[in-house]
Image: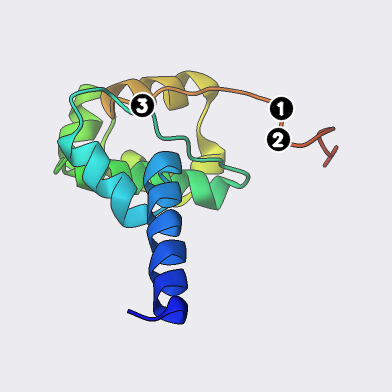
């Protein structure tokens, strides 16, 4: 192996070690989440009601729960749950917290990384 090939191999190996150590590689994160006995917390920044609805729907489907299953646990009709998923801006805080609980999620509020929050009022 020539110097050029050695340099490429070494830099590729270093990059792989860096991705492994920092868990920056999405495939690595997925593999680690599946194989790790230690719970790894995933954060999903949500800035719009559309993102919230998509995340709630995705989580319900990930858990293989139907709208009817979740609605029954919340004492709602399936139609109302469908509306809440498609128009999450209609959720009350109480309904949101109950839905998060049923889906095994929790809500955390934090300042945005890197500085002062932007006022959007």
Whether residue 75 is visible: no
Whether residue 116 is visible: yes
Query: Which of the two residues, 26 or 53, is positioned nearer the viewer here?
Result: 26
Mark 3 packing: few (<14 Cα in 10 Å), some, or many (20+)?
A: few
Find numbered disc 3 in the image and state the secondary structure of the residue it sits on. Answer: loop
For the residues bearing labels 1 and 2, Cβ distance under 8 angstroms: yes
Q: Which residue is mark 3?
A: 105
Q: Which residue is mark 2?
A: 113
Q: Can you say whether 113 is above or below 16 in the image?
A: above
Q: Which residue is mark 1?
A: 111
Q: Can you say whether 106 is above or below 34 in the image?
A: above
Q: Quadrant of residue 62?
A: top left
Query: Which of the two residues, 96 or 75, is positioned nearer the viewer here?
Result: 96
Q: Quadrant of residue 115?
A: top right
Quadrant where the N terminus sits is bottom left
Q: Which label's residue is closer to the chain start, 3 or 1?
A: 3
Label 1 vs label 2, nearer the camera: 2
Distance Cα–Cα, label 3 vs label 2: 22 Å
What residue lies at 40% left-to-right and 44% top-to-bottom?
23
Give the side of residue 66 with respect to residue 3, left or right: left
Where in the figure is residue 61, as x and y percent of width and height? 22, 47
């Amino acid at each position: 192996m020539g110097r050029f090939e050695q340099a490429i191999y070494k830099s590729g190996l270093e990059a792989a070690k860096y991705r492994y150590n920092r868990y920056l590689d999405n495939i690595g994160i997925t593999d680690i989440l599946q194989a790790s006995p230690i719970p790894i917390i995933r954060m999903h920044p949500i800035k719009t009601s559309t993102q919230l609805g998509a995340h709630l729907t995705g989580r319900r489907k990930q858990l293989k729960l139907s709208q009817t299953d979740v609605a029954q646990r919340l004492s709602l009709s399936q139609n109302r749950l469908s509306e809440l998923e498609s128009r999450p801006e209609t959720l009350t805080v109480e309904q949101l917290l109950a839905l998060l609980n049923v889906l095994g999620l929790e809500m955390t509020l934090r300042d945005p990384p890197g500085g002062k929050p932007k006022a959007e009022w």
